Image (cartoon, coloured by chain):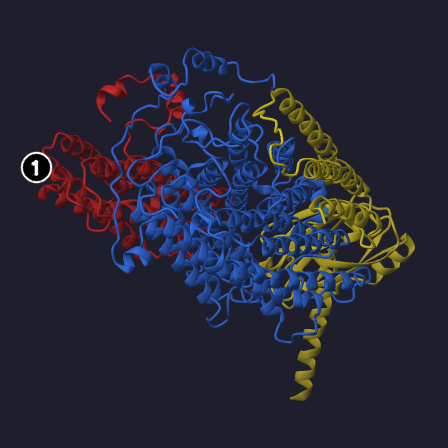
Amino acid sequence: MSDNSLNNLPKGFKGMSHDMGSDQTAFKGVQWGKVMMWIFLLSDTFVFSCFLISYMKGRTSTVVDWPNTSEVFSLHVGGMPVPLLLIAIMTFVLITSSGTMALAVKYGYEKNRKMCGWLILATAIGGLTFVGMQVFEWSKLIHEGVRPWENPFGAKQFGSFFFMITGFHGTHVSIGVIFLFIYARKVFRGDFDEGKRGFFTTMKSDYVAIEILGLYWHFVDLVWVFIFAFFYLW
Amino acid sequence: MHPGIIFLGVVVGSVLFHIFTPWWWTDIASNWGAMDDTINLTFWIGGGVFILVCLFMVYCVFMFSYKEGRKVEYKPEDHKLEKILTIATTLGVVALLAPGLIVYNNYINTPKNALQVEVNAWQWGWQYRLPGEDGILGTAQVTKITDDNPFGINLDDPNGKDDILIEDDVLHLKTDRPVKILLRSLDVLHNYYVPQFRAKMDAIPGIITYYWFEPNKIGEYEVLCAEYCGVGHYAMRAKVIVESEGSYKKWIKEQETFSDLIAKKEKDKLNITLIVKNND
Amino acid sequence: MSDEHNPQNTPIEAQSSETTSGTSGTPSKDIDYVRPAELPEQDLYHGHSFITKWIFCQDAKVIGVQYFLTAVFTGIVGLVLSWLMRLQLGYPDLVPFITAEHYYQFVTMHGMIMVVYFLTALFLGGFGNYLIPLMVGARDMVFPYVNMVSFWMFFIAVCVLMASFFVPGGPTGAGWTLYPPQAILPGTPGSNMGIILMLVSLSLFVIGFTMGGLNYIITILQARTRGMTLMRMPLTIWGIFTATALAMLAFPALLVSCIMMTLDKMLETSFFMPAILQAGEVLDYGGGSPVLFQHLFWFFGHPEVYIVALPAFGIVSDLISVHARKNIFGYRMMVWAIVGIGGLSFFVWAHHMYVSGMNPWFGFFFATTTLIIAVPTALKVYNWIITLFRANIRMNTVMLFCLGFIVTFVNGGITGIFLGNVAVDIPLSDTYFVIAHFHMVMGIAPLMVIMGAVYHWFPLVTGRMLSEKLGKWHFWFTFLGAYSIYFPMHYLGFIGVPRRYFEMYDSPYVASAIGLNEFITIAALIVGFSQLIFIYNIVSSLSIGKPAGKNPWKANSLEWLTPEVPPAHGNWGEKLPVIYRWPYDFNVPGAKEDYITQTTPPSKVISAEVEKT
C-alpha cells in the first residue's frame, strides 16, 4: 500500500474506529508478520504473567521463610559481598542489546547491510552473554545447594520458581539468539535486498523480518525487567 | 410425522418427567432448606424460559415450513424488542442471584454457638476430632502424625490434651445444634458430603476449610466423598448419626481423649518392656 | 413492507429512480463502488508431489480436512471409552475387565479427548481452516507453512496421548481436570508415565494451536477481500475468531499449569504439593498449593468451554439463516454478544471452584459474573428463535440439527444457571447434575451443530449431497437418544449421586437409581451405534451421492461462490471476489430471488430494499 493512501485515512481515535470498520485490513499498512508477532507476544505475556502470579502466590503463602534475595544473589568481589551484582550486569547487557537491535532495524530499513548485520551480531553477542551469565548464576547456586526441590536458604519453592522462570526466560533468549545469528547471515548475504525465498516457508525475505525479530527481542527484555523486579528485588 | 410434533413431545415429556419423577432430592435433614427453595425458584424461572423458548420454536416450525413464494419478514433488527428482552433477562437473573447470594452469605458466616468438629480425610477413610472440655482444638500438623499420634496433634499445645479422638468413621451429632465442620486432609483432595445436609466443602491438604450446618432430624446418614481422590474414592464412606442430647452425651462419654490415648500408649510401652523383661 | 428500515436505504432508491436500468453510467458505478485493493496478491506455495499436495500440504482446505479426520478419530476413541464407562455404571458386574483403575482411566481419557482433542480441534482446526479463507475471500491462510506445522504438532500431540494407553501403569486416571496432589501420587492410576505423557501432549497441543490461532486471527483481521468489512463477515467467522482469541489468552494458563505439574512429578518440586502423608510416611513435598493449580486450570478451563461453544453459536446462526431463508435477526447484537461472552468468560472461572476451599468471599464475585454472562447468551437464543419467526423453513437434516441444538442448548444453559448460583451449586457440585449439565451443553449441543454443519458443507467439500433419508434417521436417533441420556441424569444429581464413582453400592436412597442407570446405558449404546448411519452416509455419498453442483442450498456467503466446486488451491481462480453486502440478504423485499449473494453488486438488484451494512 503506497504511503499516499495511508496518509489519506483518518487519524487518532476516530482513525482507529474507521480502520476497524473498513474492509480488507483492520491494521492499515501493517504487514502480516508484524501483527503475528504482536499477537504471539500477547499470548506469551500471559504465559509469563501466569508464572509470575503463581510465584507471587507461592511467595505470599509460604509457610517457611523465603530466602533473603540480596544475600543469595550476591557475588563476592575482593572478599566483599556485592548484592545483586550479577543480575545488574545481566540487565545492563540485555537492555544494551535491545538498543543495538533497535539500531539494526533502523539500518535495515535504510538498506545499510553492513551496519545492520554488525548490529544484529552485537545483539546476538549480548544475548549470548546474558545466557552465559545466567548459566553461571545457575551453576553458582547449584553449587551452593539450591535445587528445584529444596535449598538450604529457606522455602523449597524458591528454587523451584527460580529455575522454572529463569529457565523459561533463558530459553526464550536462546531461541532469539539463534534467530539473530541466522538473520545476521541473511543480512550479510543480501537475502533481504533481493527478496530471497526462505528455506522452510519459501516466502520472500524482507527487511520487515528484522523489525519483527526486534519486537520479539524487546519483549524478552521487558519480561526480564519484570522477573528482575519481582524475583530479585522483592 | 411432522417434526414439530416430536419436538413438542420432547418438551411435554420433559415437563411430565419432572412432575412425576421418582428420583428427587433426599429429604432434607438440616437447616439448609433455603438452598432447596432457591433451586425451586430456579426451576420456575429457568424451566419457564426453557418451555417458552421451545414452544415458540415449535410454533415457528409448524407455522412457517417451506412454501414456495412464502412472504418472509425482512427485519434485520428491532431495537425495541432487543431492549425489552435484555431487561427481562436481566431481571430474571437478578431474581435468581439475589436470594442465592443471601443464602450464600449465611453459608459462609458460621453462627457463634456452632460446635467445632474437625474431620480428617485420608485415602480412603475418615476420622474425627472434637475440642473437648475447653472448647478449643489443639493445633496439629500432618508432619507430626505417628502411630502414637494418629492426628498429629502438637504435644506442646495444652489445648490439644482434652481433644476427643474418634478413629472410626461414625460421627455422632446432637440434633438442633449448629455444627462447624473443619476439614483437614492428610494427603489429597476429599470432600465430606451428606446429601441430606446439602452442605459440602473440599478438604485440601495444607489448609483448613470449613462449612456449617444444623442437623435437625434424628437418623443415620451416609457420608459420600465428593471430590475425586484416587481409586478408593467411591468406597470412601462414613456415617453420621444425629441423635438426641441424651444419647449424644452417652456417646461422648465413651470416646477417648488425646491424653487418654497418650496414657494408653505409655502403658502399652510399659507392658511390652515388662513382657520383654519377663521373657529374658 | 416493514417500517423499521434504515432510512439510509432511501438514497439508493432515489438514485435508481434517476437511471433507466442501472447497469451502466456513473450513478451505478457509485452504487457499486468498492475500495481498491490495499495489498498485492498473496504469494502462495503450490505443491506438486503427492506429499506436498496431501501430506505436508500448505493448503488450508487440506489442513482443515486433516484436522477434521484426526479429531474425529480421537472422538471415536472417546466414544468407545464412554461405552465402557456406561457398561460399568449400568451393569456393574457384567464386565470384570473394568476395574476401578481402568474405569478412572476411561473417565479421564474420555474427558480430555472429547473436550480438547475432539471439540476444540474440530471447531478451530477443522472448520476454521476450511472456512475462514473461503468466507473472508482470501486465497489461503496468511502463514500457510506455519499452518501446516500446526497440524502436525496436533498430530504428534494425539500420538503422545494415545501412547499413554500403552505405557506401564496405563494412561492417567486423575479425571480430565488433573487435580493435584492426587494426579501425581500413587493411589491414582497412571501416576507415573501416564500423567507425564498427558501433560506433554497437552503442552504440544497448546504450542500447535498457538501457531494455528495466529493464522486464523490474522487472516480474519488482515486478509479479507475488497468490500469485506468485519461487520459483513458471517457469524461463523465471528464465532471462530472470538474463540481463537480466547484460545490465545487461555492456553497459556494451561501450559503453565502443565509445566508446573510436570516439574512436581519429575523433579519433586512443590508448586502444588503440600505436606502429604502417604502410607504412613510423610513425603518430601511441602508448602505447595493445590488450589493454585485449580485457579490456573480453570482460568484456562472456562474460556475453553466457550472456545467450543462460540464457533457452534456462529455456525448455527448461519445454518439457521440459510435454511430458514431469512436473515439472522439482530446480527449486530449477535456479534456483540459473541464478543461480550468471550470477554466475560475470563472473569467467571472460579464458579468451578465454589467448594474448592478458596476464599469464600470470591463466591459472591464469581456467582455475579457467571449470571451476568447468561444475559448475552440468552439474547442469542432469543435471536435464533426470532429468526425462525415468519421465515420460510426448509425442514431438512441441517435444520433439524439446528432445532435440536436450540432445545439441548437452552436445556443445558438453564442448568448452568443452577450451578452458577453459588448457593445452589453447593448441594449439586460434584454430583451427576454437573455431568448432565456439561454433557448437554458441551457435548450434545455443539455436536448437533457439528453434524448439521457436516450435512451443510459436505456438498461444498466433496461436490456431492449426503442422503436426506439417512440424515433424518441419524438425527432423530441422535437427538432423542442423547436427550434421553442426559435429561434424566440431572435427577441422579438431585438424589445426591456423586460423580466419578465406580460403584454406588447399596446406599439406601440410591437403590432406585439402578434402573435409571441401566436405561441411560442402553440409550448411550444405541446413540453410539447409530453414528454408524452417519459414517455410512458419508462414505457412501462420496461415490453415489447426488452431485451437488454450485451452491445447492442457495446460500449467500462466499464459500459457495468459488469458480470451482470443490474449491481448488487458491480458492478464487483468476480474480479475488468483491463484496457488496452482508451474507444475510434472504427474501429481501423487491428482489427477484429469495437470496442475494455477497458478491452481487447493488446495480444488479436495484429494486431490492436492502439493509445497508
What residue is rendered at 16% in x and 34% in y? A104
- Farthest left residue? A114
- In the image: residue A110, left or right of residue C440: left
Percent from the top left, x then y, of residue A93? 21, 39
Q: Nearer the viewer, residue C444 or A222?
A: C444
What residue is pinned by disc 1?
A: A114
Viewer can see residue B149: no
Badge 1: few (under 14), some or many (20 or more) residues near its Cα, within 10 Å? some
Amino acid on which the number 1 mark rests in the picture: Lys
Residue A143, position as x, y percentages in the image: 30, 57
Question: Which colour denotes chain C?
Answer: blue
**x and y, in percent, of residue B14 in the image:** 76, 47
Q: Which chain is red?
A: A
Report in which chain the residue with disc 1 lies. A
Res. B69 visible in picture: yes
Q: Please, is residue C503 above or below residue A177 in the view?
A: below
Q: Residue at x 61, y 50 (%)?
A: C444
Query: Chain B appears in which tint?
Result: yellow
- The foreground one among B56 and B48 is B56
The answer to whether A217 appears left or right of C485 in the picture is left
Left or right for B255, reference A1 = right
User: Residue A189 appears in which quarter of the rendering?
Assistant: top left
Q: Nearer the viewer, residue A200 or C259?
A: A200
Residue B141 location, quadrant: bottom right
Give how far across and how far down residue C38 sits, in percent. 28, 28
